[in-house]
Amino acid sequence: MKTGLCLESDITYIRIGRGFIYLTAIIDWFSRYVLSWKLSNTLEPAFCVEALKEALAFSKPEIFNTDQGSQYTSSQFLAPLKERGIKISMDSKGRALDNIFVERLWRTVKYEEVYIKAYRTIREAFQSLKSYFLFYNNKRLHQALDYLTPAEVHFCEGKGMLD
């Protein structure tokens, strides 16, 4: 496998104040690099489409994997993938392990960032998550990546990693 071959996306929820916001991210399977992420106060497809377009500006994967959520089955989301000839892979219903890399990302984000903060607003969550994703991509070492960062692997800076 190589970087950019397969991207994956999912949505998770984050508590703020007395409600929830929704976080979507697009991650590269090979490098675990988060290409894009967006927050929304609704589950309308628009924020997922924004994240997709941002990711596709930097990557042309062969495969794009998601669950079967309504955001990902919407025509707005599928159109950019179809236009670029990207194969669409959707997990079976109720099979979170099919989307394992992004599910692992959610666990990491929640335990290292979200659960130790008490966001009051979407703006506060955005600022904090922006810093966290910079850390995650550029500083956080991954055992599965031979203790390299996602950025080192994604941009082929990890010595010997891609041999």
Image (cartoon, helix red, strand yellow):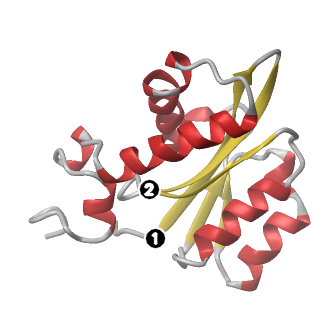
* Residue holding disc 2: 29
Element at label 1: loop
Instruction: State the image coordinates of residue 157 (x, y, percent, origin top left).
Output: 20, 68
**Looking at the rendering, in which quadrant would you find the N terminus?**
bottom left
**Looking at the rendering, in which quadrant would you find the C terminus?**
bottom left
Density class for disc 1 (Cα within 10 Å; few <14, some 14-19, many ≥20) is: some
When the figure is inspected, residue 89 is found, relative to residue 43, above or below; the finding is below
Instruction: State the image coordinates of residue 113 (x, y, percent, origin top left).
Output: 48, 27
Looking at marks 2 and 1 on the same chain, the residue that comes earlier in the sequence is marked by 1
Question: Mark 1 and mark 2 in contact (Cβ < 8 Å)?
Answer: yes
Question: Could one spot residue 136 in this view of the protein?
Answer: yes
Q: Amino acid at mark 1?
A: Leu
Q: Which residue lies at the image location 45% right of the left edge and 70% below the top edge?
A: 5
State the image quarter where residue 144 is shown: top left
Q: Which residue lies at the image location 54% right of the left edge and 61% below the top edge?
A: 7
Density class for disc 2 (Cα within 10 Å; few <14, some 14-19, many ≥20) is: many
Residue 31 is left or right of residue 147, and the answer is right
Extreme residue in the left direction: 160
Question: Could one spot residue 98 in this view of the protein?
Answer: no
Instruction: State the image coordinates of residue 74 (x, y, percent, origin top left).
Output: 88, 59
When the figure is inspected, residue 75 is found, relative to residue 137, above or below; the finding is below
Q: Which residue lies at the image location 80% right of the left edge and 44% below the top edge?
A: 69
Residue 24 is left or right of residue 127, and the answer is right
